[in-house]
Amino acid sequence: MKFSVETSELNEALSIVTKALSPNNELKILSGIYMSVYGNELYMKCSDSSVQIETSIPALIEEEGAAVLPGRLTFDLMKRMKGKKVEFETGENSAINVVSGKSRSSLQYFDTEDYPKMDEVKSDASFTIKQKTLRSMIKQTVFCCANEDEGKAILRGVLMEFTEEGYLNLVALDGYRIAKRSEKVSLRGNQRNAVVPSKTMQDISNIISDTDDETEVTLSATHITISLGVTKIKARLLKGEFINYNNILSKKSVTRVLVNRADFLESLEIAFLIAKDNQNNLVKMDFDDGELSISARSEIGSVNESIQVNLVGSPIEIAFNVKFMLDIMKNIDEESVALSFNTSVTPCVIEPVQGDKFYYLVLPVRLLKS
């Protein structure tokens, strides 16, 4: 094959598809970038066998063909090309010659026949959503997924749940906290739920833009596809039933506290400097008489922070792993949030002051009686 492309367009496309590169995959070919030139386009894709990202850019083609180039090397090399265009031409001994400006390189390639194909599965459900909305929903839930070395495999993904009222809920939980984010959507086709791997969700969030541009999401029993014009993200869903999280949600509270999110976040970050040196990242919170006192203690020191709050109900003393609270406050953008409590050993619920766009539940750490 022989073709040329704009360097800037190539690098932008490579930065997208290489998010699916799998350098440690047992199949060495999956550490490569699949490239195919046909008509007037360069088509590229990368895959780790569970997620595939593909896109295309305009190309001036003299000879059509396809090859799988070494992924990380090609990506790093193209970023350093100084010419406005990059020319590719198949040479001898399974090599592709690359020319850009005064730079001359040669890359060994794999035969595309050995590159695994992701199954094409007919989707039976779809909806459109603004990219910035989907990005926000992912950002505000995915951090609550269980890690690879903990919990059930199904908890390493985000539940996409469609309600009878026309809402899409994204839900994640890891045994210590629950995150739920809701938006109205118009679902076409079957009303099915899906569990998307957390890594796939991160890839989607990293690729979509923070704009009002819409993206189409399609689902089948086994796959999800995100369409962004010429760019598509295809991924396998996790198998199994998600936990019935509704049985865990706290419905009532005896204490409700309104707090400025930025002030709360700042105090939590200060407390974390001390708390991170104790076993559970423990911080104690005392809610009483319009004031929240946040304290932490470890072998290297102690800290006490106070902020004004609006408390309705009974005063309460409760403790948390500060990292769990920090994750939530960093990822929501409300000016103020509402915290609800029952006792010092039951979960805290964090919601908007008005509405039900998001819902977080965090388990406390039991305080030892002195």
Image (tube, rainbow, N blue to C red):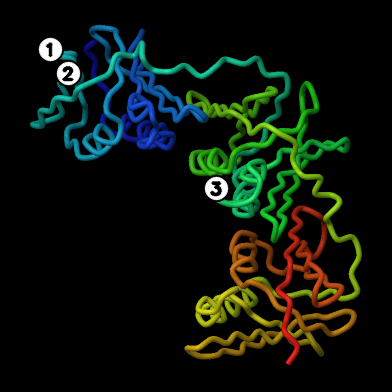
Q: Amino acid at mark 3?
A: Glu
Closer to the camera in the image, 367 or 313: 367
Q: Residues within 10 Å of mark 3 (few under 14, many from 20)?
A: few
Circles 3, 2 touching at the beta carbon (< 8 Å): no
Q: Residues within 10 Å of mark 1 (few under 14, many from 20)?
A: few
Mark 2 to mark 1 CA distance (whole Å) = 6 Å
In the picture, the disc for residue 148 is 3
Name the residue at 82% across, 61% down: 354
x%, y% of residue 257? 80, 75
Location of the N terminus (image quadrant): top left
* Label 3: element kind: loop
Q: Residue furthest bottom?
A: 370
Q: Quadrant of residue 4?
A: top left
Q: Residues within 10 Å of mark 2 (few under 14, many from 20)?
A: some
* Label 1: element kind: loop
Q: Amino acid at mark 2?
A: Ala
In the picture, the disc for residue 39 is none
Q: Where does label 2 land, which residue?
A: 95
Q: Where does label 1 land, which residue?
A: 92
Mark 3 to mark 1 CA distance (whole Å) = 43 Å
Q: Amino acid at mark 1?
A: Glu
